[in-house]
């Protein structure tokens, strides 16, 4: 037995958890990020300050940001490792809810350790206590329940071992993972208890690679062999399971073109003969054209978001679906044939089961021709010049600077859509755009997480002025901890994508411009702000200057912010020729809204339930 406080026991336990997949073991927790207040400083704060365990602490500047950093870390580690996050009770805790939602939506493991009110209620109501009249057992931490894959409150030390083991079970389960919340009452954190030595033994959590059920595999192989125009939609699961080599082998053997979701982008590197690039509302015309003609859609590790399916308008009415996913919930979508398995193992078995089958030469040639046409459109977009700088040219310059070892990080605004269409990935892990939640403010915090998980890679953060103003604080963390980022801050004085969307639905770009009430420009200097936070700042005025600035930033040892101005009214990226369902008012006072409604209703008629007949 060993006598420790609850908080000390948590720290010791976390430091001794390992994950294993394919014979490779690694520490599951790369550290703990946190901000201390009265709800955790005497517990977890004291435990981390005096611990000799290998669980390094890192100070964050914003509680939401620390969860974004953790989620990005987990994604860059292919869900085989993560960080722990600790906050005080009250606003420190509830600030994490947005990040928790993003992690759960994106199927990424994060561990949240918010402080909580006193379990004994001896001093109730304490500072920041909610005081719900229905029950004294409710605190603001109950808000985490709907956005957590596992939630528990530790009211007694005896409850801790089972809660910790349950948390690890969920965090290391590829089918169940997401945010895990263990609410820790502040008095319980400081309470001592005699713990069994076994709780702190080195524990290895083996990440499973489930194989597909034999009968389902046979049905899947038959479906593939019967298809003349199949297409693969590669999602994040193809990358998290490290299935990209197997995906390439399967696609090449069967001659099936591969399109990619936001999370799956990079599953095939740019230039591969079967790589169609992005699909859906922010996709390439090549991928979307083949999607409209496909008689079979093979989803690999995708959750089929509305952007992927272009709000269910991109696939043919009679298309069949074969969904390979480690999660039955996602495999069952679009009433497809379910192949519930690890992506790598499922593709390996499909490769064997479909041996000798190959799509017609003409089909593969058409895919290559469509891709060449799209490449020409991207080349033209990358070559644009102007003042302010065209956003597509900015992306092209960053793409060139990233090279083979770079990672681009983005999350919200017009940039993710343009990146999905235009970015030419070097391979898995080179493209990191959070688009499950598309959370403004993720970018710099996420870039920090990627760099912590993959310090050998150059991390390029693309962030718009809107996202920057919501959460730039982690620049300070990067500077303080000596973590190098290349941040390209794109200032278009407002919201470009929502402005265009607003105009298209008759909302007249309301609230999408950063300006004075009288319409004049704001006297705001975001570059000066970045410099005040400790970053080196460069201000290129042309595309040529931007390329030089990127070279300078890449060769630097510290975080550099490259400030560029673009035009929010410009739309210089080529169209995906796809649709996204955003309702338009049925009744209005402007003719533009009625015209937009007519267009909307026409597009709605092309939506399909995709109810594949049973067979």
Image (tube, rainbow, N blue to C red):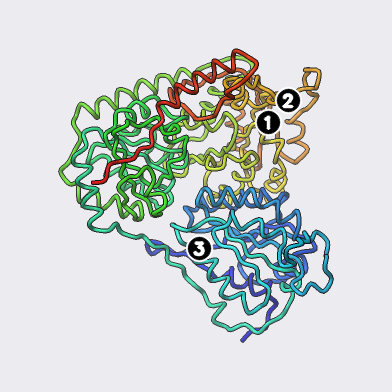
Q: Nearer the viewer, residue 57 or 343?
A: 343
Report how far apart the C-alphas of labels 1 and 2 lie in the structure.
9 Å
Q: Nearer the viewer, residue 200 or 168?
A: 168
Sequence-first disc among 2 and 3: 3
Vertical position of residue 470 compared to residue 59: above or below: above
Quadrant into which the N terminus falls: bottom right
Q: Nearer the viewer, residue 242 or 604?
A: 604
The dot on residue 514 is 2
Report how far apart the C-alphas of labels 2 and 3 lie in the structure.
43 Å
Q: Is residue 2 left or right of residue 174?
A: right
Vertical position of residue 507 compared to residue 73: above or below: above
Nearer to us: label 1 or label 3: 3
Q: Is residue 549 left or right of residue 187?
A: left
Q: Residue at x 83, y 61 (%)?
A: 127
Tag 1 near tag 2, CB within 8 Å: yes
The dot on residue 118 is none
Q: Is residue 314 left or right of residue 442?
A: left
Q: Quadrant of residue 92?
A: bottom right
Q: Residue at x 29, y 26 (%)?
A: 368
Report how far apart the C-alphas of labels 1 and 3 lie in the structure.
36 Å
Sequence-first disc among 1 and 3: 3
Name the residue at the bottom extreme: 1
Name the residue at the left extreme: 356
Residue with the mark numbered 1? 465
The dot on residue 170 is 3
Vertical position of residue 2 compared to residue 90: above or below: below
């Amino acid at each position: 037995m060993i006598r420790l406080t609850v908080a000390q026991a948590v720290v010791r336990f976390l430091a001794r958890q390992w994950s294993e997949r394919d014979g490779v073991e690694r520490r599951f927790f790369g550290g703990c990020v946190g901000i201390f207040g009265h709800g955790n400083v005497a517990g977890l704060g004291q435990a981390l300050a005096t611990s000799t365990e290998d669980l390094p602490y890192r100070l964050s500047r914003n509680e939401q940001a620390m969860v974004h950093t953790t989620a990005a870390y987990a994604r860059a580690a292919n869900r085989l490792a993560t960080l722990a996050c600790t906050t005080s009770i009250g606003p420190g805790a509830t600030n994490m809810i947005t990040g928790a939602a993003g992690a759960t939506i994106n199927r990424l493991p994060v561990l949240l350790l918010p402080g909580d009110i006193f379990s004994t209620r001896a001093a109730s109501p304490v500072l920041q206590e909610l005081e719900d009249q229905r029950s004294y057992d409710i605190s603001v931490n109950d808000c985490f329940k709907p956005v957590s894959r596992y939630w528990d409150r530790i009211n007694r030390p005896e409850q801790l071992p089972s809660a910790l083991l349950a948390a690890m079970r969920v965090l290391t389960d590829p089918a169940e993972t997401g945010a895990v919340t263990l609410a820790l009452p502040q008095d319980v954190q400081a309470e001592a208890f005699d713990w069994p030595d076994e709780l702190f033994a080195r524990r290895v959590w083996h990440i499973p690679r489930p194989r597909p059920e034999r009968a389902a595999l046979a049905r899947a192989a038959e479906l593939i062999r019967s298809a003349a125009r199949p297409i693969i939609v590669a999602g994040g699961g193809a990358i998290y399971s490290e299935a990209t080599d197997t995906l390439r082998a399967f696609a090449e053997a069967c001659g099936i073109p591969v399109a990619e979701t936001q999370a799956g982008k990079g599953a095939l590197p740019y230039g591969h003969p079967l790589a169609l690039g992005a699909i859906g509302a922010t996709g390439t015309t090549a991928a979307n054209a083949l999607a409209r003609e496909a008689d079979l859609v093979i989803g690999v590790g995708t959750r089929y978001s509305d952007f992927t399916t272009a709000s269910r308008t991109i696939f043919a009415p009679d298309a069949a679906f074969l969904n390979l996913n480690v999660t039955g919930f996602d495999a069952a979508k679009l009433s497809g044939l379910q192949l519930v398995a690890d992506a790598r193992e499922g593709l390996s078995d499909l490769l064997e089961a479909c041996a000798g089958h190959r799509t017609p030469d003409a089909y593969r040639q058409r895919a290559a021709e469509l891709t060449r046409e799209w490449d020409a459109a991207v080349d033209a977009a990358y070559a644009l010049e102007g003042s302010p700088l065209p956003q597509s040219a900015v992306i092209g310059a960053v793409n060139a600077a990233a090279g083979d070892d770079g990672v681009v990080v983005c999350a919200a605004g017009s940039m993710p859509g343009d990146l999905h269409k235009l970015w030419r990935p070097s391979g898995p892990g080179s493209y990191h755009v959070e688009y499950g939640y598309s959370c403004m403010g993720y970018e710099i915090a996420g870039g920090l997480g990627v760099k912590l998980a993959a310090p050998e890679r150059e991390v390029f953060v693309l962030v718009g002025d809107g996202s920057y103003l919501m959460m730039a604080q982690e620049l300070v963390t990067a500077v303080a901890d000596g973590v190098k980022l290349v941040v390209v801050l794109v200032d278009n004085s407002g919201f470009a994508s929502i402005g265009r969307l607003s105009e298209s639905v008759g909302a007249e770009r309301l609230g999408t411009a950063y300006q004075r009430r009288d319409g004049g420009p704001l006297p705001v200097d975001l570059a000066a702000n970045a410099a005040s936070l400790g970053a080196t700042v460069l201000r290129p005025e042309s595309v040529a200057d931007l390329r030089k600035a990127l070279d300078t930033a890449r060769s630097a040892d510290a975080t550099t912010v490259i400030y560029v101005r673009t035009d929010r009214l410009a739309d210089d990226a080529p169209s995906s020729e796809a649709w996204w369902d955003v309702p338009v008012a049925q009744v209005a006072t402007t003719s533009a809204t009625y015209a937009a409604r007519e267009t909307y209703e026409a597009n709605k008629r092309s939506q399909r339930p995709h109810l594949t007949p049973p067979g």
